Image: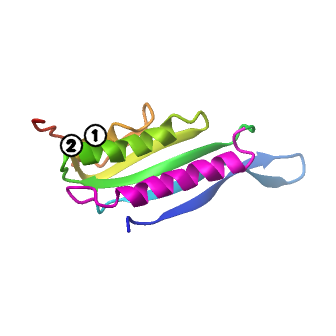
Amino acid sequence: FLGHYSIVKQPQQQESSNHSSQQYNGTSIILDMTELDTSVSQIGTIRDKVSFILDECRSSKLESSNSTIEVCVLLESPGGSAADYALAAQQLLRLRNQPNITVTVLVDKVAASGGYMIACTSSPGQLYAAPFAVLGSIGVVG
């Protein structure tokens, strides 16, 4: 089992002449990928979660509205098999390729090798790392 995810509605404050009201302008989904092993043995779970998010997006009226979904990926990984990590990265690209979904990747400690490959699937400008986090270190693929 690969972590958890949760859905958070983001309120938007609107001021009217007599009172303030809240409207929801988007949804945030938190996808926990902090326990990836070197062979990404949870790839089936990742695929199922991404498929669920895409199905929910399509079944709700989000596709036709101006609402946006932000998928926040909490990522910690020292890396592993290039082929396995490429499959995991491909799942996140399924999300990123949707016009109303933004993929934000958050790294607290390390995203090296295959983990860096996953980090690079974030939407443009949406990769965030702690000040002393290690990102990068792509090894030789043979």
User: Which quarter of the image is occupied by the C terminus?
Assistant: top left
Residue that numbered label 1 is attached to: 117
> Image point 27% across, 46% down: which residue?
85
Q: What label does residue 82 carry, if any?
A: 2
Residues at marks 2 and 1 touching, judged by CB atoms closer than 8 Å: yes
Q: Is residue 59 left or right of residue 87?
A: right
Q: Which residues are magenta?
A: 36-63
Say few, some or many: other residues with alpha carbon within 10 Å of mark 1 (under 14 / 14 to 19 / 20 or more): many
Image quadrant assignment for residue 124:
top left
In this view of the protein, can residue 134 be seen by the observer? no
Q: Is residue 106 magenta?
A: no
Q: Element under label 1?
A: helix
Please name the amino acid that badge 1 sits on. Answer: Met
**Residue 13 % position (x, y):** 73, 49
Q: Nearer the viewer, residue 141 or 134?
A: 141
Q: Nearer the viewer, mark 2 or mark 1?
A: 2
> Image point 72% across, 37% down: which residue?
66
